[in-house]
Image (cartoon, rainbow, N blue to C red):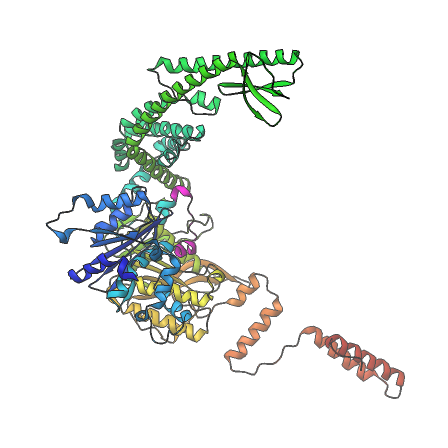
């Protein structure tokens, strides 16, 4: 089935020893990509990523991997298909050097459909061990390697499967990120770190950067605005940015016949605001690369385009009339035509009113209706002869007609309307050509304003908090944070904590954190992930110092929900997320794991976690920067983890006050915690004292291998004492007292045994 559609692609596999096949799928402004290297029989894929308006991510992927064949859907958008052609230089292929030619292959959309891809993957027997004999087992096995929750990426993989199924049955998958300047980050990781992004920040938030040059340029802009002397400029620029919208998107709508004047108004106000921004930054263009780039690319062509729009559309009159009014200062006949039409419509009104009054005076039931450049008399009843009336048609009981004067005026107005529309169409066409020529300029203007908006927001938060610092970027594989703080917690209450991780084999880059419940372990893990993330989107960070060797991937395993919508248990979801990290983490990845294995038996969870840590610690250059929080204290106490200089144990500092109450200090220190203090946490949240006291009793007996006794509460003991006292006081010779005692005993039985019958 695949051979017919992929015949040209499949033939390439036979004729060339080394082939790289790239499949791309672009939809909803997101790009999914996957490529297959015939020498390694591995598919590498990129998680869904927000694509730019110029398709920069696609261009970077093509540049990085140099594919032999690019596969995309036959139903891909014209815009994306055109961009692929341009980036692949289809028109300039050298026929004398076929090895350098990249072919673009269009295949049916059906191969990219999500359900089709999933079914195909489940039928590839070479992917699964023998034990995976059902679809459920296969799905559970392959979900740790395949991005089933990333639709565009899954579709891109679907474009490669026919080639692999036919030619390369021995297939394995590896998680890898194609675009070298972007930090690999999945939607689940963003959710786990509680990273939300409004529309302005979406592009940067979804694509943390790995390019030191780009990040340094962003830092330079923030540093510039942190100067108190530039705060007024910051406020001015933020005001200028408020009316700015995505001009290229709106330009696609403006030449629709039903275009609202509000769209033109937004475009004009956006261009004016952009010009004000450029004017404000011109004196500072030498201060940062970003300012110079903005002023250089937003050339004098932008004011020229603004002038073209303003001399083609009368915005004030358009807003008043609620329609687009085109103008041409060089053509006086245009305004004369509009004036003539106004006068003709007034004349038609007068003629229709005069004729209608005459008909009413003659006892004829009539009225009139006026439309643009037209007037109609409406006569109810039968048609009659009149020399001055021109009968048009009949609609129900109403005859429509005109007088000769009205007919002449209507024809004259219609002719002038045609002349006016022809002139407006010419203006509209010329304006369309001018705007089309300025498309690149409008894209530049929108992107620069969007980037400036992000940078101003970063600068503002750093200015207002007054505790954000510029990260230092290093070439070595090391993360150093001194007195870092969680960015979402108020500075007055947060306790600063540091973190140092070095990939050098003699240094620690695996940190195992133990500590009491509610002591701040999860917050600390999230803090480290957020600070690295913030540094790699170009933001200052809340810390005394941060020195960062840029990471390539960030994996987060933190509980966020019970995954009911995914149809899997918490523990299975834990395994999925951890499997992604095991398969994809490199020596420059940051892996955050919180409470692994709490959804299963403690012994099994401890064994899995110990094995995971040991494997990573022995993997030399491939060992990621790893932070694990756990209550599995046997990991260290029982020496389940092999000794290694890479592993460092930390705990959360606590103390007891004068009353013996546990106090959390939320400070990370070296050491190991051997208890969780769950009972103290239970009392803190209001669990009854009796429950906690009983739990302490059970724990003591379990630890000392003692027999567990059933619980007797205080109320039962009171009743037992009272019952014994009454029994002692009963006179056995007094049948009345004996009867009262048994009645009392019966009431107690009824109270404690509800199903007890009177029988």
Residue 476 drawn above or below residue 675: above
Magenta part mainly helix, strand or loop?
Answer: helix
**Residue 391 is drawn in which quadrant?**
top right
Relative depth, front residue between 171 and 520: 171
Residue 85 drawn above or below residue 618: above
- Where's residue 544, x and y in %? 35, 49
Could you tell me which quadrant the C terminus lies in?
bottom right
Residue 595 seen from this side? no
- Where's residue 110, x and y in %? 35, 56
**Direction bottom: furthest residue:** 733
Residue 155 drawn above or below residue 370: below
Answer whether residue 194 is magenta in the image: yes
**Residue 136 is drawn in which quadrant?**
bottom left
- Where's residue 623, x and y in %? 28, 64
**Direction front: furthest residue:** 385
Q: Residue at x 43, y 75 (%)?
A: 603
User: Is residue 754 shown left or right of residue 369?
Assistant: right
Relative depth, front residue between 553 and 187: 187
User: Is residue 741 shown left or right of residue 720?
Assistant: right
- Where's residue 155, x and y in %? 34, 56
**Residue 267 is drawn in which quadrant?**
top left
Could you tell me which quadrant the N terminus lies in?
bottom left
User: Is residue 712 shown left or right of residue 410?
Assistant: right
Relative depth, front residue between 569 and 85: 85
Answer whether residue 571 is magenta in the image: no
Question: Count the marks: how many?
Answer: 0
User: Is residue 498 shown left or right of residue 408?
Assistant: left
The magenta stretch is 187-201
Residue 382 seen from this side? yes
């Amino acid at each position: 089935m695949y051979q017919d559609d992929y015949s040209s692609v499949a033939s390439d596999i036979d004729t060339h020893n080394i082939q790289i096949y790239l499949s791309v799928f672009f939809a909803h402004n997101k790009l999914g990509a996957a490529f297959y290297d015939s020498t390694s029989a591995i598919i590498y894929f990129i998680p869904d990523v927000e694509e730019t308006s110029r398709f920069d991510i696609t261009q970077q992927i093509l540049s990085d991997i140099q594919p032999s064949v690019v596969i995309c859907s036959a139903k891909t958008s014209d815009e994306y298909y055109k961009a692929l052609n341009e980036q692949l230089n289809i028109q300039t292929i050298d026929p004398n050097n076929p090895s350098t030619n990249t072919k673009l292959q269009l295949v049916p959309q059906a191969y990219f459909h999500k359900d089709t891809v999933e079914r195909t993957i489940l039928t590839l027997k070479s992917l699964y061990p023998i034990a995976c004999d059902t679809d459920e087992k296969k799905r559970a096995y392959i979900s740790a390697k395949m991005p089933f929750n990333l639709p565009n990426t899954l579709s891109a993989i679907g474009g490669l499967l026919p080639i692999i199924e036919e030619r390369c049955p021995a297939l394995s998958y590896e998680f890898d990120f194609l675009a070298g300047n972007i930090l690999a980050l999945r939607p689940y990781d963003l959710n786990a770190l509680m990273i939300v992004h409004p529309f302005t920040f979406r592009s940067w938030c979804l694509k943390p950067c790995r390019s030191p040059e780009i990040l340094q340029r962003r830092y330079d802009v923030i540093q510039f605005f942190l100067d108190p002397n530039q705060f007024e400029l910051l406020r001015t620029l933020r005001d200028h940015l408020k009316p700015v919208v995505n001009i290229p998107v709106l330009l696609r709508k403006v030449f629709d016949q039903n275009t609202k004047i509000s769209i033109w108004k937004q475009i004009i106000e956006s261009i004016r605001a952009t010009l004000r921004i450029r004017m404000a930054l011109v004196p500072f263009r030498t201060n940062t690369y970003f300012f110079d780039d903005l002023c250089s690319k937003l050339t004098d062509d932008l004011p020229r385009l603004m002038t073209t729009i303003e001399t083609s559309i009368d915005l004030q009159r358009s807003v008043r009339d609620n329609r687009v009014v085109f103008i041409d200062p060089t053509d006086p006949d245009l305004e004369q035509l509009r004036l003539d039409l106004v006068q003709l419509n007034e004349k038609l009104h007068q003629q229709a009113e005069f004729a209608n009054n005459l008909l009413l005076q003659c006892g004829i039931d009539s009225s009139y209706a006026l439309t643009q450049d037209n007037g109609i008399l409406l006569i109810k009843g039968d048609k009659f002869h009149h020399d001055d009336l021109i009968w048009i048609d009949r609609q129900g009981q109403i005859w429509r007609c005109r007088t000769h004067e009205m007919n002449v005026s209507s024809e004259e107005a219609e002719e002038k309307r045609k002349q006016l529309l022809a002139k407006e169409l010419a203006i509209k066409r010329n304006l369309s050509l001018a705007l089309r020529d300025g498309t690149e300029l409008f894209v530049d203007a929108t992107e620069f304003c969007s980037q400036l908006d992000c940078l101003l927001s970063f600068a503002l938060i750093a200015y207002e908090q007054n505790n954000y610092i510029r990260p230092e970027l290093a070439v070595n594989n090391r993360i150093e944070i001194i007195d870092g703080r969680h960015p979402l917690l108020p500075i007055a209450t947060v306790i600063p904590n540091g973190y140092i991780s070095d990939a050098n084999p003699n240094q620690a880059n695996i940190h195992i954190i133990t500590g009491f419940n509610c002591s701040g372990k999860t917050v600390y893990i999230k803090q480290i992930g957020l600070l690295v993330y913030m540094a790699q989107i170009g933001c200052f960070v809340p810390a005394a110092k941060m020195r960062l060797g840029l990471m390539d991937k960030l994996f987060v395993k933190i509980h966020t929900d019970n995954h009911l919508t995914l149809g899997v248990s918490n523990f299975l979801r834990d395994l999925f997320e951890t499997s992604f990290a095991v398969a994809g983490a490199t020596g420059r990845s940051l892996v955050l794991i919180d409470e692994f294995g709490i959804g299963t038996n403690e012994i099994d969870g401890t064994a899995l976690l110990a094995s995971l840590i040991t494997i990573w610690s022995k993997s030399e250059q491939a060992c990621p920067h790893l932070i694990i929080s756990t209550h599995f204290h046997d990991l260290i106490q029982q020496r389940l983890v092999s000794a290694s200089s890479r592993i460092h144990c930390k705990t959360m500092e606590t103390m007891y006050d004068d009353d013996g109450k546990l106090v959390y200090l939320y400070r990370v220190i070296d050491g190991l915690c051997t208890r969780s203090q769950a009972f103290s946490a239970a009392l803190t949240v209001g669990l009854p004292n009796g429950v906690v006291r009983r739990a302490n009793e059970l724990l003591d007996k379990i630890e000392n291998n003692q027999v567990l006794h059933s619980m007797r509460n205080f109320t039962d003991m009171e009743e037992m004492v009272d019952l014994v006292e009454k029994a002692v006081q009963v006179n056995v010779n007094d049948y009345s007292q004996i009867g009262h005692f048994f009645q009392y005993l019966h009431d107690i039985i009824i109270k404690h045994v509800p199903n007890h019958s009177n029988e």
